[in-house]
Image (cartoon, coloured by chain):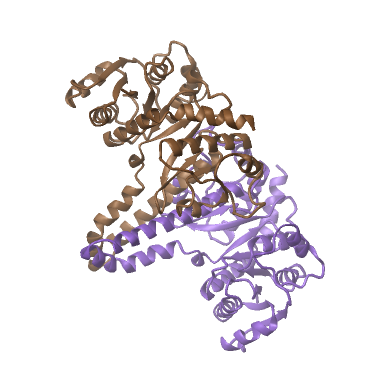
Chain colours: A purple, B brown
Amino acid sequence: MTRIVVDAMGSDNYPGPDVEGAVMAAREYGVEIMFVGDESKIQPVLDSVGGANLPVRVVHAPEILTMEDKGVALALKARRPNAKNSMAIGIDLVKNGEADAFVTMGNTGACLATSYFRLGTIPGVDLPTLAVAFPSATGSFLLVDLGANPDCKAENLLQFAIMGNIYSQKVRGIDNPRVALISNGEEEGKGNELVKAAVPLMKASDLNYIGCVESKEVYGGNVDVIVMDGFSGNVFLKTSEAVAKLLTDKIRDTIKGGGLLTKIGGLLIRPAMGSVRKLLDPSEYGAAPLLGVNGLAFIGHGRSDARAVQVAVRVAKEAVEAKVLDAMKSAIEESLKK
Amino acid sequence: MTRIVVDAMGSDNYPGPDVEGAVMAAREYGVEIMFVGDESKIQPVLDSVGGANLPVRVVHAPEILTMEDKGVALALKARRPNAKNSMAIGIDLVKNGEADAFVTMGNTGACLATSYFRLGTIPGVDLPTLAVAFPSATGSFLLVDLGANPDCKAENLLQFAIMGNIYSQKVRGIDNPRVALISNGEEEGKGNELVKAAVPLMKASDLNYIGCVESKEVYGGNVDVIVMDGFSGNVFLKTSEAVAKLLTDKIRDTIKGGGLLTKIGGLLIRPAMGSVRKLLDPSEYGAAPLLGVNGLAFIGHGRSDARAVQVAVRVAKEAVEAKVLDAMKSAIEESLKK
């Protein structure tokens, strides 16, 4: 049975959504759950959601990393051998082979640092990276790096691409993922120095590299894995969210401020708008895999509800069962032989 | 009377929209128009739109720079003293003091190169930059750089900020523009190396610098001038367009694919949706100013219609009359004394 460690102290409303969602996952997908966190807070939720007859147990962790943990102080907490926070104890369970993957809805930087210091990286990978699935016109695509690494070298982009490619094959079920670099134009010669240096590496790789593209190709559904440095990736992510919010707000306000017929029209299309909004709901996509560390870790949104936590655990289970970590190690090893 | 040179060979459907729009501007705003381009193609349009009694004349240019012009070949065409293409002849009119500003709907890179080589830069400015106005929740903001400079130094970002600030004051009528850098997070210590190096320069400047922000602040209406390198700026621009298209397409398709009531609702909100779409229509924003060259040049969208060309000419007129070039030179000079 696949064993998933869930940080019970992760989400903004912890431990409610975290515990309830993971219990739902245990019930539905037949996974074993280990909760890390404050036992006195976890147990009441566990009792209330009826986890008694499921393969669920609690590993007590008296401390917690919050959104306030950053910089050097965070690095120290992430490294300390006897750290007592839920992330460190949870990730150690993965490291020691007692669990197969770690899932948290908590501080992204904290999980990144804790995973990096406690698990180390896959041989040949310089920087761990965060990947996330986005909706497109025809399905979805994987964006990597989402913001973990604001400064990258060309070799980092190649490693991101190799890992994103494996993840897309093994977990997202895409046969021969189309991998692209984002650039400021699709023509040969466009790009910043980083992209120009990465193009020959991508071309020389075994990837199904389709070239440099702009966002319209990505959202249009013509790319499966889109690779960029973490600064641009974060601009891409945050701009996408901001424009979606601007537009849906404007539509709502325009309908609200319109005449009677417009208001009636707004009521009639409400279910349709709901499905569009769902398309943009991060909780539909579960959690972002942390790629490149020597173990499996998944980071979900702080705003996640139980349903989102359940999806995150499902994604982690799929990654474990697809042996994505081994496949990534092999792919990176292969690339180093070139 | 303010004299604007209009590239008649600029838009995708040249010279129709270019000539008609500029004639509309001459009629409405009392500007003098000089068309550059193929006289035999311009004159028939001019006759058909009744430009006879207006201060409009044609300066013949037998050649044209197209979307195919790029790289070294473009640089050569842009520099050649006796260049016969419409951009070179038009920009020379500005350089020689025969006109006050140049407006084109043509190839952005071609206009950039031609302006750079023929006008030179403002003393103290290393790289000319493209700025553009975007809609926000409460009005609009100016983004600089839009993609002219995929690789920047911190000093370039400061220069972009100073020029965007002056442009916002003088042309966009904003009293004390709030200037921000985009970053991957708002906390101190976030940012790539470029942003981290730019922060102290921004803080030491006379700008109303409000810090590092994410896209949600920008689209939320809390920023007047948002500064980034041209690579990120282009990702911001293209991602904004792509998400807006994805969303409006999805809404349209969902309504089309819905039941009878949804379809009726869709019909009822159609006028409201039209006003939302208008918000995102680049033609509503006229043209992007090229900042940092020693003269005024404006570049509009290739898809511009006559109305968009008219707006572009109006913006150019406003920039001339606000003496934005002189103000920019003074501001850059002041900043160099620091």
The front one of B197 and A161 is B197
Q: Is residue B52 above or below residue A97?
A: above
Residue under the image location 48 percent in, 50 percent down: B218
- Residue B304 at x, y percent in the picture: 32, 35
Which residue sits furthest top?
A: B82
Q: How many labels does the image show?
A: 0
Instruction: Assign the N terminus of chain B to one quadrant of the image.
Output: top left
In the shown orientation, is residue B153 left or right of residue B133? Answer: right
On the question of residue B257 being in view, the answer is no
Which residue sits furthest right?
A: A81
Residue under the image location 33 percent in, 69 percent down: A271
Q: In this view, does A96 lie above or below B266?
A: below
The front one of B203 and B55 is B203
- Residue A314 at x, y percent in the picture: 57, 71
In the shown orientation, is residue B213 left or right of residue B277? Answer: right
Q: In this view, does A145 lie above or below A269?
A: above
- Residue B89 at x, y percent in the picture: 39, 16
On the question of residue B187 being in view, the answer is yes
Instruction: Assign the C terminus of chain B to one quadrant of the image.
Output: top right
- Residue B145 at x, y percent in the picture: 51, 38
In the shown orientation, is residue B271 left or right of residue A48? Answer: left
- For residue B3, what is the image quadrant? top left
